[in-house]
Image (cartoon, helix red, strand yellow):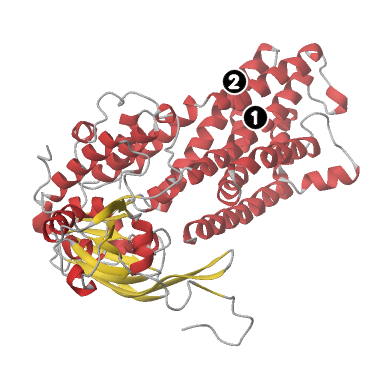
Amino acid sequence: MNGLVYTRFELLRAFRNRRFFIFSLGFPLVLYFVIAGPQRNNHDFAGTGISAPLYYMAGLASFGTMMSMISTGARIAGERQAGWTRQLRITPLSSRAYFRAKVLTAYAMASTSLILLYVAGASLGVSQSAPRWLEMTGLILVGLLPFGALGIALGHLLTVDSLGPVTGGTVSLLALVSGTWFPVTHGFLHDLGQCLPSYWLVRAGHIAIGGSAWGTLGWLVVAGWTILLVAVAAYAYQRDTNRV
Amino acid sequence: MFETGSSLVNTMPAEGIQLQRLVKSYRGPQGLVRAVRGIDISIAPGETVALLGPNGAGKSTTIDMMLGLTRPDDGSVSVFGHTPREAVDSGLVGGMLQTGGALIRDLSVREVIQVMASVYPNPMDVEEVISVAGLREAAGQRTQKLSGGQTQRVRFAIALVANPALLVLDEPTVAMDVEGRRDFWATMREYAGRGKTVVFATHYLEEADANADRAVLMAHGRIVADGPTTEIKARVGTRTIRATLAGIDRAELAQLPGVSTAERHGDAVILRCSDSDQAIRELLTRYASVRDIEITGAALEDAFLELTSDPDGDREAPVPDSAGTPS
């Protein structure tokens, strides 16, 4: 019926959660200043043609926003454990409204993380033209779609206890391979990275060097993962709710 | 209390709730569990019905099917002429499920009730629900800080705020203290008094007796008895009198008011009583020679098991391969 109120309270819950502030907002910010701060005058980071503060802003933005999106899974797993998911199923709230609330909340959290990193980046001298900021933001938001689906899928497949390690491990590995910490420009890791949506999230930051940051391959990879993970999320939700 | 929304009674179709030949099995750790083995229950609109039975009787599975949480293997469920899913989607049903006992975190009690009110087409007033559920003092508290009893009250409030034509409660008083239980049942009876249909599961005969018009006694997935609670009560002896009494016929003892069955072993007699107070008075009045009297409260669980002993096994070995499934 009225999924809007449900979404509003879902947001309220998410922003009241202390772990969210520490891990999804605080952690990437602290890392950013620790890593990029000392290199603030490096204007051509590791031969990429972009400054170190911009490189790490894009890298940590991808890290923080991935964390925010996937943390949906932790909230879902918690709700399942509490029996809340079953309780919702005996209300008129549609599964569409349920998913909408989850995805919007994840995006709200990711956007907060993103804005904070932009501010942090600006404080270390990152500057771009307005269209560049917008394009970069747009690409990041699109690139987060598969992670929103991944969060929902994990939340319905895993338990509260297993979700923390799985989420942490996945995000760390993805960040490593995708060039969050240092550019991966050749070899197996590079080939692997290009097949992952997180790689293209980091690449969104490279918009600053001009031209199209993604290209056909980028769009295909992001679209492919989105379709795949949405299907997995739908399956996980179905399986979970059809259980005795 | 309950001033709003009484017109819903009139819009409620006359069919009530019909469970027909319901069968449900599921795979448990020890093979196939035949949770519900063909039950028929017909509930009239406005009736308050207790599903009574020991753990594992099939009460929760029955409730899950009534709410559309589980699809029956066979048979049909009709809720006011709709499928359970349709009834739920149109806001006719409010439920309090058996769960881990927790609520979603990081919202206050009032906010949780507001969220739930927002998804129903014809909800009760949130402040009214807070009052009747006894949550006035806890309304501003975060849900993760509540006691077990308060949590149960919130879960009841969530079911109530739907303002449902059918209120379903699965073992609602678990984790409530004595006072909490009393308040809870008083609120439930008031709600039922508005012409609403209420179905609740319990393994306490006293709860069924005090709060339901009718009890459906279940054991091992079947209905063992279905009728006014007085009838069920008469069949399930709640207390046992043991005494030494020579020379009185067993049949004569069984006829005593308040006694449901009588046994004798030599001079020792064992009387299972539906009303042990009445039975002991009669026993002392009629038989002066009775001595060594001992009255024990039989655990209801034991009484159920006795009344409902399972003839053909609760579980079956998993079917090996294509040899066929039990039908």
Circle 1 sits in a helix, a strand or a loop, which is it? Answer: helix
Residues at marks 1 and 2, CA–CA distance in whole angstroms = 10 Å
Left of B143 or right of it: where is A36? Answer: right
**Considering depth in this image, is A77 or B196 the residue closer to the camera?**
B196
Chain letter of the residue beneath label 1 in the structure image: A
Left of B59 or right of it: where is B92? Answer: left
**Considering depth in this image, is B172 or A198 the residue closer to the camera?**
B172
Where residue B244 appears, as percent x and y from the top left, is: 28, 60
Where residue B285 appears, as percent x and y from the top left, is: 11, 56
Where residue B128 sits, quadrant-wise, is top left
**Considering depth in this image, is B239 or B10 the residue closer to the camera?**
B239
> Can residue B168 be seen?
no
Residue at screen point 59% across, 63% down: B29
Mark seen at residue A116: 2
Q: Which residue type does callout 2 highlight?
A: Leu
Residue at screen point 14% across, 54% down: B281
Where residue B15 appears, as percent x and y from the top left, is: 16, 69
> Can residue B164 be seen?
yes
Mark 1 and 2 residues: CB-CB less than 8 Å, in contact?
Answer: yes
Left of B292 or right of it: where is B23? Answer: right
Where residue A30 sits, quadrant-wise, is top right
Mark 1 or mark 2, which is nearer to you? 1
- How packed mark 1 is, by other alpha carbons closer than 10 Å (few <14, some 14-19, many 20 or more), is many
Mark seen at residue A64: 1
Where residue B184 appears, as percent x and y from the top left, is: 24, 40
Position of B270 relative to B149 (above/below)? below
Residue at screen point 39% across, 53% down: A89
